[in-house]
Image (cartoon, rainbow, N blue to C red):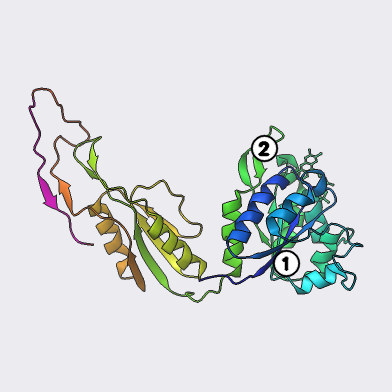
Amino acid sequence: MKLEGERVTLGVTGGIAAYKAAELVRLMVRAGLKVRIVMTPNATRFVTPLTFQTLSLSQVRVDTFEPVAPDRVEHVALAQETDLLVVAPATANILAKMARGVADDLLSTFYLAYGGTTLVAPAMNTQMYLHPATQENLEILRKRGVVVLEPQEGELACGDYGPGRFPEPPYILERVLDLLYQKDFHGKAFLVTAGPTREYLDAVRFISNPSSGKMGFAIAREARRRGARVYLVAGPTHLEPPWGVEYIPVTSAQEMYQRVLDLYSGVDVVIKAAAVADFRPKPLAEEGAKFKKEGREGLLIELEANPDI
Ligand SMILES: Cc1cc2nc3c(=O)[nH]c(=O)nc-3n(C[C@H](O)[C@H](O)[C@H](O)COP(=O)(O)O)c2cc1C
């Protein structure tokens, strides 16, 4: 499915992760979204509006009293032109203002005038995030229907370790698209196979193929975005499983065959995008052991057929 210029307003607030919002804008524009940016005055101390203007190809809004055109009251006009509000990164400060209805800058005023689907990606120092005030504000927003992305755990810019890290922009994009896609596969279950299989000769050697898994992963992602429940049975790849799919990693063709059989009767659609090995070698060594080269002039590998999936 192609998105057709759905209108996202991105609120950027004054946190150290503001620079990562630039990457998010690039991804959203590439995904076909029409992106407009509202920065808090404090956010402009971290990244210039020019960066966001260049990436979004539209004028960045900062000041409540300086509309982009004289016939507009910006917070009201923009509210009518927005399908989804994303606040990323969301500071502790903006979360408090959104929770309590404070309207003292363009972004917080716009939030009250808008009242539509909203996603926030909090990012801050761990103590700020875990503070009861912040947690209460997040709870108020969740109860109001705001989608709150959990921050990641890890080392923060301030040197602390814990929750508070800004999620990676591709993940935020996925959650944005999830909110915008029509759910025309709602109630359907998909089973998708992907990637290569590995057929082991001994504990460390195997026969495989160069399938990347990209096709199956893309199909699984698309079906998920459109509301399906998706099982992705995949051989070894370097890909991140798409958000929201049930990921079932396997190694050999026989394993893939078994997992597919287990799931088959419970799904509506099966898409077989895996590059499954037709044959597997008869083992050259005991289970868990390596075969030795010493004393061998050559090697004959005997193959037996794998089941068709
Ligand atoms: C270097 C620096 C980094 C900051 N990083 C964060 C942050 O990641 N998250 C946060 O909530 N506040 C952070 N702050 C504090 C906010 O900038 C401050 O609370 C500000 O009032 C937020 O304004 P805004 O929400 O209107 O953008 C940081 C401050 C400084 C000086």
- For disc 1, does the CB lie below 8 Å from ligand 1? no
Q: Classify residue 282 by image quadrant.
A: top left
- For disc 2, does the CB lie below 8 Å from ligand 1? yes
Q: Three-letter amino acid code at disc 2? A: Leu
> Which of the labelled discs sits on residue 156, or is there none?
2
Overall secondary structure of the magenta stretch? loop
Pointer 1: what residue? 144
Question: Residue at left 29%, top 61%?
Answer: 260
91 lies above or below 82: above
Question: Residue at left 65%, top 43%?
Answer: 163
235 lies above or below 61: above
205 lies above or below 138: above
- Closer-to-camera residue (11/27): 27
Task: Read off the magenta span.
Answer: 296-308
Relative side of 256 to 33, left or right: left
Front of the two marks 2 and 1: 2
| Disc 1 element | loop
Does residue 272 show up?
A: yes
- Is 5 inside the magenta-drawn segment? no
